[in-house]
Image (spheres, rainbow, N blue to C red):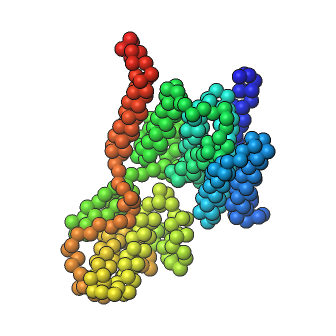
Amino acid sequence: MSPKKAFVAWLWVAICTLSIFLVVPLARTIQKFVSARWGRAFFGYGVLAATAAAFCILVFTLVFRLNVRSPSNYLWLAAVASLYVYFTLQLWRAPEEAVHFLEYGLLGFFLFRALSLTIHDKSIYPTAFLIGSLIGIFDEVLQWMMPGRYWDFRDAGLNALATGLFQVALWEGIKPRIISEKISPKSIRRVSILLTANIIFLGLCASNTPRRVAAYTERLSFLSFLVKEEPMYEFTRRHADPEIGTFYSRLSIADLEKEDAERSGHWGKILKDWKDKDYSLFLREHHPLLHPFLYEMRIHIFRRDRKDEDALKAKDEKSRREALFAACKENMILEKYFGRTLEESTYQWSAEKKAQIAASIDPTKSYRSPVSAGPFQIKERTLWLGILVGLGLLLGLNLAVLRRKDPGRLLSR
């Protein structure tokens, strides 16, 4: 391998990575400029055009350079291209987000080309994927550090997905002849180290809660600007109320009471202004990490009113009572923990309506609100315990591979 060739290959990786990072502080400016001139959809169409161009180039390579006649290669390429198109269309309400696919698909290409100079087994695909994923996580951290930008696990996932899909296209679509089937123990160690770095990095991001940011910036004054940034993550708390049941929030009871007491007029005005606007747009415009109180309150209101409507449409008495029960409990949560803001908004129920519903159900029965509960609840301690168990399994795998290759090697040390 020529040192010059390796230098040039990794230089392209560096240029691509640096370009992605340099876009971060300019993203909003670019977005406004493009949207004003050609509309937001221009981003989506650009990604679709780039996907089509990449697909054509890869097919051309298979047909005229590699002389491949196997249908499976073309089917795999078509499947990957279809997934790029599918996920781009899924982001059409915010098409600028689809640029992640363009950036990290290109990065995946440069990573494979550079790695192929030294890695010639199938570990090259997860290696390129994990390096791209690690760069994507750091990209999101940079965004979090910028005023007006915020961290998003979903965007980190999009970055990883874009890199990974391109590796699948190479693995099953192109099937480079220089890549062998056998994976060496050294390659397994390399992949394990990169996977460990990704897992720990993501864990640190999840643990970068507002209180932890305040704690380390107090000691490291040069990082004090981070206190003003929006939260990177906040673990959801489970609250048990003896009169209502269980509900979840990113805020403590004390923080809920403080927000309701100090900012009820502000939040109430926003709710009034959005009264006749799209509910899903409201949730997109008011991020749960930036405005957890307002975000959660609006979902409680939506669930309460939806259940009230379901009761009117119920086909039997049991369904009607179940819907009214949920509506009543959601209203109890709103009145107790969002009460002042509810009074300032236009969403407060009349005393007659509350009495009518309460007469139809058993209000003392316990309730569990699904608002902010998510598919599962996890505490920070549990998260890191899971991470440590996963890393332990990775270590065990590597030791097993090493022992299998040379049973006497460990004993000789």
| Numbered label tally | 0
Percent position of residue 92, x then y: 63, 64
Q: Quadrant of the N terminus?
A: top right
Q: Is residue 72 visible?
A: yes
Left or right: 277, with 174 as reference point: left
Q: Residue furthest front?
A: 69
Horizontal relation, residue 193 to residue 412: left or right: right
Q: Is residue 285 left or right of residue 260?
A: right
Q: Position of residue 126 (x, y in %)?
A: 55, 38
Image quadrant assignment for residue 339: bottom left
Q: Is residue 123 above or below residue 368?
A: above
Give whichever of 364, 132 is nearer the camera: 132
User: Residue at 67% across / 48% down in the picture?
Assistant: 70
Residue at 37% of width from left, 78% of height from top? 307
Q: Percent x, y for residue 275?
A: 50, 78
Q: Nearer the viewer, residue 319 or 379?
A: 319
The answer to whether residue 147 is seen in the rendering is no
Viewer-proximal residue among 152 and 79 = 79
Determine the residue located farthest toward the top in the rendered image.
412
**x and y, in percent, of residue 40 in the image:** 70, 63
Quadrant position of the C terminus in the picture: top left
Q: Quadrant of the rendered structure where residue 407 is?
A: top left
Could you tell me which residue is drawn at 26 percent across and 61 percent down?
240
Rendered view: 146 above or below 271: above
Going 63% across and 63% down the picture, which residue do you hit? Answer: 89
Decide if residue 71 is on the left or right side of residue 267.
right
Tell me if residue 218 comes above or below residue 334 in the rendering. above
Q: Which sits in the foreground, 71 or 229? A: 71
